[in-house]
Amino acid sequence: MTDHTYHVTSPGRVNLVGGHTDYAGGHVLPFATDLQTRLAATPADRVTVRSEALDDRRSFATDDREATGTWLDYVKGCYAVLADAGYEPGGFRGELSGTLPLGSGLSSSASLELAVLALLNEADDLGLGRERLAELGQRVENEFVGVDCGILDQFAVSLGRAGHALYVDTESRTYDPVAVPDDLRVVVYHTGVTHELVDSAYNDRRATVEAALDALGVDSVQAVTEADLAVLPDRQRQRLGYVVRENERVRRANAALVDGDVATVGAVLEAAHRDIAANYEASCEELDYVVETAIERGAYGARLTGAGWGGAAIALADAADARGVARSVHDAYRDCYPEHNGRFHLVTPSAGVSVERPGQ
């Protein structure tokens, strides 16, 4: 909309490997995608924002801290955490649109949070760096929405670099970009099975892992070996054991990506999916089917992406073959699960959130 002052582009994210390691102080390997949330906004006295995808318009005063239990909380929460940090940004009139599907495991919530935070940072000249924006986005989820997520999603959305994944140490909050080969494509297949993280087993899994770390007297999975797990109760050993192995898989995948060894990256993804399905119990029948079918149809490897319990799976394929793999998976999935609206995207690593002022 040409009459808006600011145009924000905020990507989604795909996590190649490192599922549920971020809240345990482990490593992750995500990238920002070219599926995006877009926010066109003009400064105003209060906040009025419309979601094109939901065909819903909401409004609130900038000092309103009352949660609504709707998508608006991801916007309201930005004002709440900024106020707690000593900032008082103004309101805006905005239109939300874009290509990033909602509830698909591609981090539409973090994309929305970072779009709003980046807008307010620019419009009110708050002077916040990208790492700080990511941390504030995480606080929106943790403290206002009620999802105990780690930093993975917000880091990827804020700090993404075109053509690269990010190898992130979530304990130290340090990261290194790693190039993704130009002839590689990531197929994202959305199963059509929606998930609500607050109402799912996500918080339960996190609590179990944190209790296991506490029992071992450590703060991070990086200080744990599989041998250390023997003293834990069965459920804690099962859950933390997955996280320990997943953390090592991130290291292996990063090293393989640096070497351009896509076959090894694919094998790591396949092992990661088997482990998260069996020992974290975060998959579902439809995700398992997509992963198995993608590998059968020529992908190097595949796994669920995001938290799980629905949403999307990813598959790695050569650029020349990726659309054929995706189409083949889609045809098979549609025959097996006609009740679900499955769909696919081919994505590439893209830049993090950005704000433009047309005409300046």
Image (cartoon, helix red, strand yellow):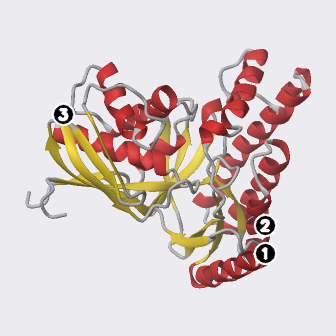
**Disc 3 marks which amino acid?**
Gly
Q: Residues within 10 Å of mark 1 (few under 14, many from 20)?
A: few
> Which amino acid type corresponds to the residue marked 1 in the rendered image?
Cys
Seen in the image, is 128 located left or right of residue 53? Answer: left
- Between circles 2 and 1, the one closer to the viewer is 1
Mark 2 is on which residue type?
Tyr
Residue found 47% across the figure and 59% down from its top: 164
From the image, tell me which residue sits under label 1: 336
Q: Which numbered disc covers residue 289?
A: 2
Residue 285 in percent (x, y) is at: 80, 59
CA separation in Å, label 1 and label 3: 50 Å
Image quadrant assignment for residue 231: top right
Percent position of residue 63, x then y: 26, 25
- Per the model, the C-alpha gap separating discs 2 and 1 is 9 Å
Q: Quadrant of residue 214?
A: top right
Q: Is residue 46 left or right of residue 345?
A: left
* Residue under label 3: 90
Residue 142 coordinates in the image, percent (x, y): 51, 29
**x 49%, y 42%: residue:** 175
Judging from the image, what secondary structure is the residue with disc 2 in? helix
